[in-house]
């Protein structure tokens, strides 16, 4: 039963979505990411910044695989409002609290689409005096539009489709799915 303000089509969307990556695929990607991040950052005692809300799930799974000293903080910056698609406006809801001056920073995000949000986060870290900024995203979309900011560590790639699950949402829902799904565009 739908509550007021909830999308009416959530069950239909999930039932018709295409599973792109299951739990085993995601675990393998997170293992690869952790190996690469450890090789790059293990001696630097970095500040790890998790971009809320989408990166909470991937960051939580990734951080348990990193076996070196680090500090964890968060930020919340988005181009999406209320489960809609992206706009050109960057909305800063919360900046990091740990001072970044002179530090190595690892920024974790759920998905890189065009790179506007991640670019704003990296600029914020530079402005705050970070000595080195390393970026990691669970998913990168393959396309030739937008900024396509270079990322240091990518777990998985997807075609240019609407994806959700494992941190990414569909209209604010389904971030908790243990796989990564693509929207069936014929049902949208």
Image (cartoon, rainbow, N blue to C red):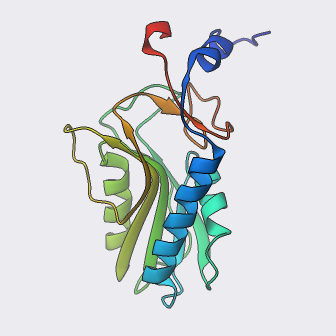
Question: Residue drawn at (48%, 74%), measured in percent from left and top?
Answer: 37
**Within the image, what quadrant is residue 157 found in?**
top left
What percent of the width, then of the height, locates residue 127?
Answer: 32, 71
Question: Residue drawn at (57%, 48%), measured in percent from left and top?
Answer: 25
- Relative to 44, residue 124 above or below: above
Q: Residue furthest right?
A: 1
In this view, the residue in front, 38 or 80, is 38
Could one spot residue 7 in this view of the protein? Answer: no
- Relative to 174, residue 108 above or below: below
What percent of the width, then of the height, locates residue 34?
Answer: 54, 70
Q: How many marks?
A: 0
What percent of the width, then of the height, locates residue 97?
Answer: 56, 69
Question: Residue drawn at (80%, 9%), measured in percent from left and top?
Answer: 1
Question: Residue drawn at (42%, 81%), measured in percent from left and top?
Answer: 40
What percent of the width, then of the height, locates residue 113?
Answer: 35, 42
In this view, the residue in front, 16 or 63, is 16
**Within the image, what quadrant is residue 103 found in?**
bottom left
- Relative to 144, residue 84 above or below: above
| Residue 88 horizontal side relative to residue 33, left or right | left
Could one spot residue 101 in this view of the protein? Answer: yes
In this view, the residue in front, 32 or 162, is 32
């Amino acid at each position: 039963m739908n509550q007021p303000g909830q999308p009416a089509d959530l069950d239909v969307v999930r039932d018709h979505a295409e599973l792109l990556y299951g739990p085993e695929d995601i675990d393998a990607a997170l293992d690869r990411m952790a190996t690469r991040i450890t090789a790059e950052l293990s001696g630097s005692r970095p500040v790890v910044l998790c971009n809320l809300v989408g990166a909470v799930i991937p960051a939580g799974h990734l951080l348990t695989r990193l076996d070196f000293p680090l500090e964890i903080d968060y930020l919340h910056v988005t181009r999406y409002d209320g489960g809609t698609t992206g706009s050109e406006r960057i909305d800063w809801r919360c900046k990091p609290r740990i001072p970044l001056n002179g530090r190595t920073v690892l920024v974790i995000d759920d998905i890189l689409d065009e790179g506007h949000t991640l670019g704003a986060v990296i600029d914020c870290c530079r402005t705050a005096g970070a000595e080195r900024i390393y970026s990691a995203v669970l998913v990168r979309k393959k396309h030739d539009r937008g900024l396509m900011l270079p990322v240091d560590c990518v777990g998985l790639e997807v075609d240019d489709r609407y994806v959700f699950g494992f941190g990414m949402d569909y209209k604010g829902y389904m971030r908790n799915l243990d796989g990564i799904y693509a929207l069936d565009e014929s049902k949208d």
